Amino acid sequence: MPEPTKKEENEVPAPAPPPEEPSKEKEAGTTPAKDEEEVSPPSALPPGLGSRALERKDSDWTLVEPPPGEEQAKQNANSQLSILFIEKPQGGTVKVGEDITFIAKVKAEDLLRKPTIKWFKGKWMDLASKAGKHLQLKETFERHSRVYTFEMQIIKAKENFAGNYRCEVTYKDKFDSCSFDLEVHESTGTTPNIDIRSAFKRSGEGQEDAGELDFSGLLKRREVKQQEEEPQVDVWELLKNAKPSEYEKIAFQYGITDLRGMLKRLKRMRREEKKSAAFAKILDPAYQVDKGGRVRFVVELADPKLEVKWYKNGQEIRPSTKYIFEHKGCQRILFINNCQMTDDSEYYVTAGDEKCSTELFVREPPIMVTKQLEDTTAYCGERVELECEVSEDDANVKWFKNGEEIIPGPKSRYRIRVEGKKHILIIEGATKADAAEYSVMTTGGQSSAKLSVDLKPLKILTPLTDQTVNLGKEICLKCEISENIPGKWTKNGLPVQESDRLKVVHKGRIHKLVIANALTEDEGDYVFAPDAYNVTLPAKVHVIDPPKIILDGLDADNTVTVIAGNKLRLEIPISGEPPPKAMWCRGDKAIMEGSGRIRTESYPDSSTLVIDIAERDDSGVYHINLKNEAGEAHASIKVKVVDFPDPPVAPTVTEVGDDWCIMNWEPPAYDGGSPILGYFIERKKKQSSRWMRLNFDLCKETTFEPKKMIEGVAYEVRIFAVNAIGISKPSMPSRPFVPLAVTSPPTLLTVDSVTDTTVTMRWRPPDHIGAAGLDGYVLEYCFEGTEDWIVANKDLIDKTKFTITGLPTDAKIFVRVKAVNAAGASEPKYYSQPILVKEIIEPPKIRIPRHLKQTYIRRVGEAVNLVIPFQGKPRPELTWKKDGAEIDKNQINIRNSETDTIIFIRKAERSHSGKYDLQVKVDKFVETASIDIQIIDRPGPPQIVKIEDVWGENVALTWTPPKDDGNAAITGYTIQKADKKSMEWFTVIEHYHRTSATITELVIGNEYYFRVFSENMCGLSEDATMTKESAVIAKDGKIYKNPVYEDFDFSEAPMFTQPLVNTYAIAGYNATLNCSVRGNPKPKITWMKNKVAIVDDPRYRMFSNQGVCTLEIRKPSPYDGGTYCCKAVNDLGTVEIECKLEVKVVAQ
């Protein structure tokens, strides 16, 4: 499976696409990469976006900017790859409505599997998922000529199909591409152009095909309103210069679906790029991989000693079969195998205190339609089912009616049932409106069918009648039709909504509309329309009503609030029959209609009070009087003029911490006539002019605690007061303040050593130091039973180790340490218990490293530097011996310290091989250990090389092993030949293990000499032994005599080729014992512990593979220690080998 493609984002932004561009494009133009090699950037990008790449977030794609020069670098790399095309697709011309086919051919002689081919339109549109009504992709393979043929057929071409196309083919590290043009000419009677991008328009844009992003617009022919061409708009620049409150408006206007992703990317664009000290090369911003594929993340470290950790969504990744880690020099590589949709997330890697992150996008394979829809005919009221099958279970399938997507829901008449690969569209109670062309679309195909719905004749048995009712009486509209079908009631052309007062009754063929307590708004033209029939039953309802003032839109106390300086237009709905006359007044002064600042306006159903540029003096009670023949109505309305509050006074910072402070302020003197709802707080650095909002929810109190400030940086804060009208002007800034705090306490305070008069303490630096830095440490102690702490060091010390001197013997002291900086001393770190001032004898113990428990092998001339740690107090006495004798210090350097001893040999010689014994002595306690050192060298040449026989083109050679094996076993021989004429040597056989060989395929008539090199683990011998006589390959006439060979007896008694080794194991961790044995017939292996055979014990597992015998002890305990024996038996003998196992318990 091809590797995923990566996406970069560090290039200078190019102009954004126009508003018509799709905001949810999923075809990102991925190009297959090398198998298990570096991922490559996408080769197809949207037009008008320059070098931008696409990045997906939650199945949406957003724009990302690749690094500069990447396009050119890719073209240079591609120009050096192999050429795969033997026939490239050529450009063509087609008329609107006609078909055209493009053909590409690839030779498959050198290919082990089918190459991957992709078709693109422009730079960005991958046509693989566009196959359907207007586009078909085919591929064939001719076995005789071994040629792959790939076809792209465009059906019923349209004018907007014209443009530049590209075909790319890849196979492992080979890549080839070809561009070609398509020209589409107009023809008579063509339908209006359908822009492919118009198929991606979202709902709310006023077109008939509005809906989610899909390609349903390519499934049908329909008129599309011609849109005026709009200038190219850079959405990035709009977002950069817009206020945060305008982000959602811009997203809605230009069809941005991943606003959060764009804002994150915008923030990264504004951020200055910082050079990483830990990473020489960071992760790419994003990677893309097909579902089930493999992805490779690579970072390069500046220092290979740094520890690297990988995280997925904040959780550390552990090595497994899915996650594989690899180190190559400074490179740290993470492979993710079998990528699933759950792997689509954010990843980051840390090295030291730095980290870099990326995002992985997993793309699902296309879904194909395996069973097509079928045309269906039904009657009104019947249940209709349209069925199809797709290639995957529970796949994402979209249904369309006449090209419009069907979205099922609780109130929808359409239901979709999924049964594995089967998808069924169910229409309950079909109506004539359901007659249409239905289609289904997947990511890889589509199918369509027609549904026909017929109607039955309808008769009106009882029509509706006009009614006139008094206010408060019941209205009942009744009709009867010949069919028991539902219908819709409308009033004045609008649907009637049921309520507690209005009921719609349907009982058989009778339909009723009942309105209890008739109101004036119930008057109008009512129409009943049976479903699925072009028949209407009208009736008029007239309600008589006295004058009435409707104040439902006002507060409970009929108060209207207006902001000072704004215009008040108070529209009061009124009713009455006949229409009443309205009069406004304030106190005793009537308000007349006209052009004054305060005036009234009259309309048939309302009366309006207008106040231009409201002032504070306009507050008061206004009266409205209505009068008609049916009566009178009066009402009073209170007008309240309010304004923004005054700014608060400058806040006061009362307390400061390391990254926080506490601030207080007083409410503003004038609240603007509306209660203060809360406050907004802003903060900025003293040297900056950019203020940052600290709270997005109003602060109800007059105190606040800003956090997350940078320690050691001066800040200022200011306040905004908020009432129901709006936000006041900002207060004056506070006085500058600097967050500063002491460090955290030192950590890991431990006793390093104790003598009769001194105590040496050791500790670690504080976990958190802060901007004030760390000036040093103060170590204090007090004697047990007192609380007087004595300073041990007069001056601050910068080291994390100090010795307290002048202490009385046998005294007990408590110790604590503090870290000091400019903010003062930190909290002390106490040692948990009193310390006895008295030197303690610690028995010696030697810690032999694991690699020295077996024979330590080095070559002649190499350096030997062995470090053996030990323990013991007071300082122990050390003695080294070699093979029981004292060591010659002129040849071998011994260096001893308080905690370890070192054997150093600058240039090892074979005479340095032997057994080295170490003795560590403290008082009367003695500990010993031994180390075996083997110094090896190249072997000498074989002793004698003879030509045993010559026949035909063959020569039989024999030789004897060398006298000097270089202090290591001989691992093989290398045989060379030379023609007597040229005496140029050529290797015939390498790594040969026997001491006889037959050289074949020699040239007849030539005379040859032969020589043999010895070989051990150090390499070949410096010299070779050559045959004294030559071998002449005789020409025709020599009779070849077949040699007589005796049958070789392969029988062999058991023999251990690799012995068991004494082993140390840790309790609770599995331990293994290994040895190797050979023998013929194959020997039977038996394991024993303390001379008792191990049989059917679940704590032990025994393996034997190719002569290697393994005993695994599961989670051993000290009880499992002892002598283990491996016994091998066959018909020719028995052999045993033993070792000791010691199980150690690690102290918790």
Image: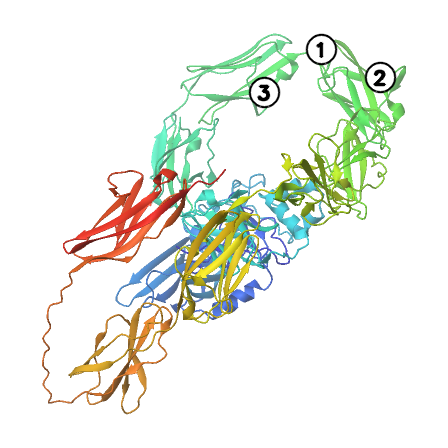
Q: Where is residue 671 in the image (x, y as percent from the top left)?
A: 84, 26
User: Residue shown at 38%/63% (left/top)?
Assistant: 103
Q: How crowded is mark 1: few (under 14 residues within 10 Å), some or many (20 or more)?
A: many
| Residue 1022 in which image quadrant | bottom left
Give the foreground label among 2 and 1: 2
Give the foreground label among 1 and 3: 1
Q: Residue 1068 carries which label?
A: none
| Residue 1006 in which image quadrant | bottom left
316 or 39: which is nearer to us? 316
Mark 1–mark 3 Cα distance, whole angstroms, equals 21 Å
Mark 3–mark 2 Cα distance, whole angstroms, equals 39 Å
Amino acid type shown at disc 3: Asp
Q: Which of marks 3 and 2 is nearer the N terminus?
A: 3
Amino acid type shown at disc 2: Val
Is residue 123 visible in this depiction of the protein?
no
Rendered-image quadrant of the N terminus: bottom left
User: Residue shown at 61%/43% (left/top)?
Assistant: 839
Name the residue that disc number 3 marks: 525
Up the image or down, 857 lies above or below 415; here it is below
Where disc 3 sits, the SS reads strand
Amino acid type shown at disc 1: Pro
Q: Residues within 10 Å of mark 3 (few under 14, many from 20)?
A: some
Q: Which mark is residue 621?
A: 2
Name the residue that disc number 1 marks: 546
